[in-house]
Image (cartoon, coloured by chain):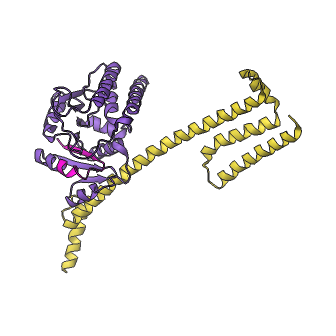
Chain colours: A purple, B yellow
């Protein structure tokens, strides 16, 4: 069984090395950093330390970057793909639990959730409210409860790798992929994880944009759901 | 409508048509993208030759002033053209993303193969053989 850890990184010069080192410490799995057209020293650091990575010629955003990782996993015939953020929020010690649940519960995707046991970094109030709204929307659409729909810490099966390599949402990939999988009768499980606050650097979502973000992401979820329902009827 | 205004409108419509044709010939616009512009130009020519056709449109929509029908028609075509632009923009964006992803993956693969062949431990047997031969040549 071949496992690939995909680490999307955009301007993570301060975190990427520490993240990769802690991944190496906890596991022997193959890993690849997707440098999403960083404008800082990320590329230099990756080269200096001979870290396996794909340098995107232009910034594609998290969706395009992650899809590159899934394409790489698909082309190199990996059985499981793990997504883990480069900013040090996600602890590599949980990677094996993600894989265990994926295999034992024959799930198609397993998401690491910080809101099951509610310990560790719980994010800001406004983002928790936003997250709750997304959970409710997903519940209404698919009748399934996903406590941490924006979590970028997840494991995918071979079938899902193939799906994502072919088509992956560009705008809000984390919640959209959950709706996509659930509305096509795939099994999405969650496990409880503890997350750290970002080690260094700023989060990509500013509070001013968050209301606009919520409207757009809600609309995107509805479209994803309706699209899949229509496609299934055909 | 007085006839001198009508002649000017016909003239403008024909010039519009010719500009489009010229652009297509110069390949400044792809033929498939020009179709909607041709349609617009032909409708303009038809309206300027048969202004009474505007009264028919006005009748359908209950528009009192036929001039407003002109605006309605123009706006309808503009909306159509802008929307078709959005569609081809999205298509282009998708194609570019695909190209960036595939080229980036390919570059990484080439880089890895080159590094492997330089150290003489290539996964690719053909490359490994070539490297071995080159080393032999050097020794000779």
Residue B109 placed where, x, y %? 29, 56
Q: Is residue A208 left or right of residue A75?
A: right
Q: How many marks?
A: 0
**Residue at 19% of width from left, 58% of height from top?**
A49
Q: Quadrant of residue B25?
A: bottom right
Nearer to the camera, B30 or A233: B30
**Is A25 situated above or below A181?**
below
Nearer to the camera, A20 or B140: A20
Residue A222 placed where, x, y %? 40, 25
Q: Is residue A15 magenta?
A: yes
Residue B127 placed where, x, y %? 25, 64
Q: Is residue A149 visible?
A: no
Q: Is residue B40 left or right of residue A92?
A: right
**Residue at 73% of width from left, 39% of height from top?**
B42
**Is A195 situated above or below B104?**
above
Q: Quadrant of residue B68?
A: top right
Q: Is residue A168 magenta?
A: no
Q: Is residue A118 left or right of residue A230?
A: left
Residue B57 placed where, x, y %? 74, 26
Q: The magenta stretch spans which residues? A: A1-19
User: In the current view of this chain or complex, which residue is farthest to the left?
Assistant: A25
Check the picture and name the quadrant holding the C terminus of chain A. top left
């Amino acid at each position: 069984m071949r496992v690939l850890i995909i680490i999307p990184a955009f301007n993570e010069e301060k975190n990427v090395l520490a993240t990769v080192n802690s991944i190496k410490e906890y596991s022997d799995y193959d890993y690849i950093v997707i440098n999403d057209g960083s404008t800082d020293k990320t590329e230099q650091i990756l080269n200096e330390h001979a870290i396996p990575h794909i340098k995107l010629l232009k910034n594609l955003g998290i969706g395009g970057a992650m899809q590159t990782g899934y394409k790489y996993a698909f082309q190199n015939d990996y059985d499981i793909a793990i997504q883990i953020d480069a900013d040090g929020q996600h602890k590599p010690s949980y990677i094996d639990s993600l894989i265990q649940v994926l295999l034992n519960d024959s799930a198609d995707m397993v998401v690491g959730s910080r809101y099951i046991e509610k310990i560790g970094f719980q994010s800001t109030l406004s983002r928790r409210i936003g997250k709750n709204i997304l959970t409710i929307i997903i519940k209404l659409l698919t009748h399934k409860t996903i406590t941490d729909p924006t979590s970028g810490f997840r494991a995918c099966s071979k079938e899902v790798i193939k799906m994502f390599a072919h088509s992956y949402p560009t705008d809000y990939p984390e919640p959209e992929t959950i709706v996509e999988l659930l509305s096509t009768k795939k099994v999405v499980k969650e496990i409880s994880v503890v997350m750290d606050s970002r080690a260094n650097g700023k989060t990509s979502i500013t509070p001013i944009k968050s209301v606009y973000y919520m409207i757009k992401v809600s609309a995107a979820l509805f479209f994803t759901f309706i699209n899949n329902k229509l496609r299934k009827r055909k | 409508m007085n006839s001198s205004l009508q002649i000017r409108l016909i003239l403008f419509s024909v010039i519009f048509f010719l500009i489009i044709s010229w652009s297509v010939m110069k390949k400044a616009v792809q033929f498939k993208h020009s179709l909607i512009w041709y349609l617009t130009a032909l409708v303009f020519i038809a309206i300027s030759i048969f202004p009474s056709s505007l009264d028919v449109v006005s009748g359908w929509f209950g528009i009192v002033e036929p001039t407003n029908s002109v605006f309605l028609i123009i706006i309808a075509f503009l909306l159509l053209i802008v929307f078709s632009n959005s569609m081809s923009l999205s298509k282009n964006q998708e194609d570019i993303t695909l190209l960036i992803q595939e080229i980036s993956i390919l570059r990484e693969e080439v880089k890895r193969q080159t590094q492997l062949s330089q150290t003489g431990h290539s996964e690719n047997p053909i490359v490994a053989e070539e490297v071995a031969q080159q080393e032999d040549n050097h020794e000779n």
